[in-house]
Amino acid sequence: MSTPTDETHPRVTIAHDYITQRGGAEKVVLALHRAFPDAPVYTTLFEPELTYPEFADVEVIPSALNRVRLFRRSHRLALPFLAGAAHSVRVPAKHTIVSTSGWAHGFRTTGSKIVYCYSPARWLYQRDAYLGSTKLTAQRIALNLMSPFLKRWDRKRAATATKYFAISTVVKQRIRDAYGIDAEVLPAPHSIDIALPQEPVDLAPIGNPGGFYLCISRLLPYKNVDAVIEAFNDLGYPLVVVGAGPEEKRLASLAGPNVLMLKDLTDGQMRWLYQRSEAVVSASFEDFGLTPIEAAAYGKHSIVLRWGGFLDTIREGETGVYFDAPEPKAIAAAVEESRRIEWDSELIRKHTELFSEEHFARRLRQEIESIEMPATTS
């Protein structure tokens, strides 16, 4: 892997799998761009209507696959073509920071490649959790056929990295298992600014409650939002679910009269919900899970599954409580337990300092400087 000498190349670029949704990974890309504001962002697919409006101020360079509107609207349909699309992307820069859970580490770079990994590809290494069913669907059949090739491609491209960062301890272990790479843990930053304006959300459908619970999630099988909804159907406490995804219609059919489902909210509306919520609830198998950190910025505790990234971001009894299985009864019991605790909002807020954008950006700049140092001193 050679270092470019062409001075027209950017010093730093950013790469991301696809920018076609609103999620924690896309928030990290925006944080990366704030840290490196001159950096263009390379990706396979980009659909401005489906992601955060802040990307309007970012130079996004998609692959040729982006010409297919169907793929921009549903990146899962593009799965058979994404390896080829990723390999076709050439990123001319001295340093490329790769934000990935499966594809962008395969982009061809001309300089150093610093990979920030949310997880090795779930569709290769956690297929049942990713697809949410053991039935032989067309997508599962396609993955079964393509898996040997994709795993070889995936491991070969991972080996081209100069440095690997893992979003959490559980992902660090997963990277070691998949690639034999010892990654450094670097928690994702939160970008919530509690001083910014808020926009009210209409909660009239559930009676305008003062202390509702909040579940923020993409509506995918492994997020287990159905278990959260069923728990609150039984509890009767008001629940606001914010998110979109392929499970949307099924989950809406499960929701009782105390459950409100919302999507495509503005940042101001999200701030309003966080400020007025009782707590955040998540039963997801999260590799990190950003929402408890964002809630903590408002002094709100979390009720989450004892698994994965939540083990890094929650202090039990201080910033949240755990439940041991993504099942309605376990969730309901944890909610009731949380209601018996006197929470210290200031202590919860202070916890977020460990996950600041400043810390995140500083560590990445240090890594770039350490890569450049040998060339500077030789």
Image: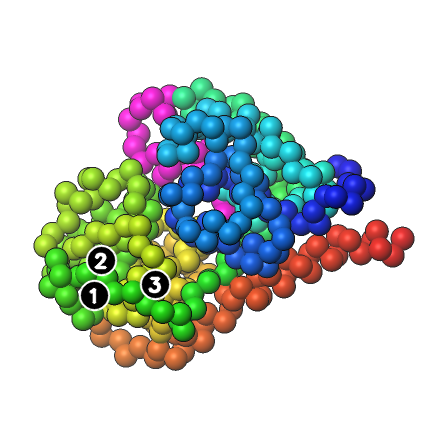
Mark 2 highlights which residue?
A: 240
- Residue closer to the observer: 131 or 240: 240
| Mark found first going from the N terminus, 1 or 2 | 1
Q: Point out which mark residue 212 bears.
A: 1
Q: What element carries label 2?
A: strand
Residue at the spot of label 3? 268
Q: Which residue is at 22% across, 58% downward?
A: 240
Residue 97: image x %, image y %? 62, 48
Residue at the spot 53% in from the left edge and 64% down from the top edge: 357
Label 3 and label 1: CA atoms lie apart by: 18 Å
Q: Residues within 10 Å of mark 1 (few under 14, many from 20)?
A: many
Mark before the other along the chain sequence, 2 or 3? 2
Mark 3 lies on a secondary structure that is helix
Q: Identify the residue at image location x=62%, y=44%.
A: 181
Residue 157 placement (x, y as % from top left): 62, 34
Q: Which amino acid does label 1 sit on?
A: Phe
Residue 115's place in the image compared with 125, above or below, is below
Asked whether, in this view, residue 173 is left or right of residue 228, the answer is right
Q: Give the magenta-colored segment's residue range.
A: 117-141
Amino acid on which the number 2 mark rests in the picture:
Val
